[in-house]
Image (tube, rainbow, N blue to C red):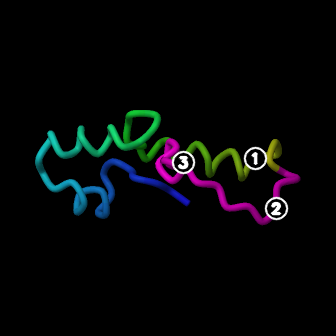
């Protein structure tokens, strides 16, 4: 369950082209930054790895704490 991610159409739609709005949006995330596409890719790679071989049927919010704030 990806959260706000830079470079996505949804994020651009929500924040527009104003850099100040983008900064303000990041303040609503407990980690104080918006995810990069690499953050999503790293999580997917983990779930595809042998280390996650016993994990099944989970939904993981990858949102820097946005869903709990």
List the single residue furthest toward the left: 18
Check residue 69 in the rendering and tell me which mark sits there, or answer none. Answer: none
What residue would you read off at disc 1?
49
**How many neighbours does mark 1 have within 10 angstroms: few (below 14), some (14-19), or many (20 or more)?**
few
Residues at marks 3 and 2, CA–CA distance in whole angstroms: 18 Å
Mark 1 or mark 2, which is nearer the start of the sequence?
A: 1
From mark 1 to mark 3, how far is it between C-alphas? 12 Å
The percent position of residue 7, horizontal first and vertical second, equals 30, 51
**Residue 27 percent location from the top left of the image:** 33, 38
Q: Determine whether, in the image, residue 6 is placed left or right of residue 23.
A: right
The residue tagged 2 is: 56
Residue 6: percent from left, percent from top: 33, 48
Which residue is painted at 23% across and 44% down in the image?
22
Q: Quadrant of the N terminus?
A: bottom right
Helix, strand, or loop for circle 3? helix
Mark 2 lies on a secondary structure that is: loop
Q: Nearer the viewer, mark 3 or mark 2?
A: 2
The magenta region covers: 53-69
Of the pair 37 and 29, the residue shown nearer to us: 29
Is there a contact, CB below 8 Å, between mark 1 and mark 3?
Answer: no
Q: Residue at x 54, y 48 (%)?
A: 41
Relative image position of residue 20 (x, y in whole percent): 15, 40
Do callouts 3 and 2 mark residues in contact (Cβ within 8 Å)?
Answer: no
Q: Does 54 lie within the magenta span?
A: yes
Give the residue number, with chain letter if any, for mark 3. 41
Does 19 lie within the magenta span?
Answer: no
In the drawing, does residue 52 fall left or right of residue 59?
right
Quarter holding residue 58: bottom right
Looking at the rendered structure, the secondary structure element under dot 1 is loop
Lower position in the chain sequence, tag 3 or tag 2: 3
Please tell me whether the stretch drawn in magenta is mainly helix, strand or loop: loop
Residue lying at 72% horizontally and 52% vertically, measured from the top left: 48
């Amino acid at each position: 369950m990806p959260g706000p991610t830079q470079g996505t159409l949804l994020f651009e739609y929500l924040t527009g082209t104003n850099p100040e709005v983008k900064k303000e949006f990041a303040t609503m995330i407990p980690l104080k930054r918006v995810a990069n596409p690499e953050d999503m890719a790293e999580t997917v790679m983990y779930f595809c790895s042998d280390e996650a071989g016993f994990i099944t049927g989970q939904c993981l919010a990858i949102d820097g704490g946005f869903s709990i704030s």
